[in-house]
Image (spheres, rainbow, N blue to C red):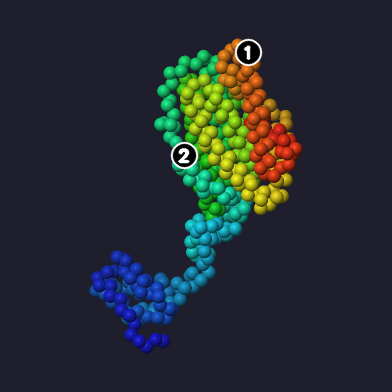
Amino acid sequence: MDASPPATIDLDDLGFEGGAHLLIDRALHPLAPGDRVRVVGSHRDLALHLRSWARSQGHAVDGDILTKGTTGAQRWRSAVRAGTVDRPADRADPTWGLAARGALVEGGGPALTSADLVERDVVWADIAAKLYAQALAGQWDPNTAIDWRSDDDLPPEVEDAVVQVMTYLIENEQAALVVPARHLARIHPQFREVVAFLATQIADEARHVEVFTRRALLHRTTLGTSSVGGRASLQTLVDEPDFTLASFLLSVLGEGTFLDLLSFLERHAPDPVTRRVAQLTRQDEARHVAFAQAHLEHRVATDPMVRGALSTAIQRRHDALRQSTGLNADVHDALVLLAAGAFTPAAVRVGWDRVHELEAAMREGRRRRLARLGFLPDEAERLASLHTRNFM
């Protein structure tokens, strides 16, 4: 043992109830177990509180001499870093729990068992942080971004068509909200960029549900119809348990298809409120598609076998919906009417053709996205055509 006199900490009148341990800890920090410090002060309970605190910390006390124990060093002996601050780990340890990425994690804590997606490649997209920043910058307030004061006096049938399309969009956006929300808590917080982006996606979808509802009720007090076939199609998205497959079916194929639909509405909507709603929501949806496409391209690049799972998922969903009616007929007719712009045979024919052109554009968009995932042209064409007739 070092025979030299120990260093002295003078606490003056500071007691443990006022933070005296901070000064003592600071003095002990550079010392090795067995080293000593002398603790003096004028607080009336110093001796009593020093002994009590020292026992709790594994130190020894003899009079005013405090000897550093080994408890502190032992406590952190098995601690590990939860990855690094700048880059997520390839695999997150469930026992890191909710610790910040890069934090020194004390061993022995509870495992975050609810977050079962712990492999980086299973959830990752390099573009996630960039898209999250874009999402923050691109947030918009429905109260100010849209001029809800509408003087348009649309023909009743046209207003009914708008309400029907809005009703359909609400239903689909609720599915687009539920699916990422279902998977969000399953992603380990080590992959915080992905978690943060999905949080913005969920907020986007909630806002879309709001604005579609407000537009539907702008001149009406009731909504349109909801078909069994449409809801059955969306249920297959909600029920998909795999994060990658759910992202593929919902965002790459479904929301990707919706980009064309919202562009269609922006072109053919009969009033400025509907056009503005379509424009703003399409901007958000483009981010969702970009993330999912990047995630799928990452998955295919790291594991080409995933491509087979994607093909199977499309075929399985197609088979499950084979007997369904697909798109609500009321929605189809409402789109035709909006694109027609008038109740004349010639206008309806034009509207009908425009909806068919829309469906062809949707199919071509899906084919391009599938091609970017490495599907050969014939296979991409075939799979694109198997997508649900309900669009999403």
- What is the crowding at mark 1: few (fewer than 14 residues within 10 Å), some, or many (at least 20)? few
**At x 40% / y 75%, what residue is drawn?**
30
The answer to whether residue 6 of the structure is visible from this angle is: yes
Q: Residue furthest top?
A: 344
Position of residue 53 measured from the top left corner of the image (x, y, whole percent): 37, 71
Amino acid at dot 2: Gly
If the image is split into quadrants, where does the C terminus sit?
top right
Kindly state the secondary structure of the residue where label 2 is placed.
Answer: loop
Position of residue 143 measured from the top left corner of the image (x, y, whole percent): 41, 31
Identify the mark at residue 346; answer none if there is no mark: 1
Horizontal side of residue 381 vs 167, given as left or right: right
Amino acid at dot 1: Ala
The answer to whether residue 238 of the structure is visible from this angle is: no
Kindly state the secondary structure of the residue where label 1 is placed.
Answer: helix
Q: Is residue 114 above or below residue 214?
A: below
Horizontal side of residue 302 vs 379, given as left or right: left
Residue that badge 2 annotates: 138
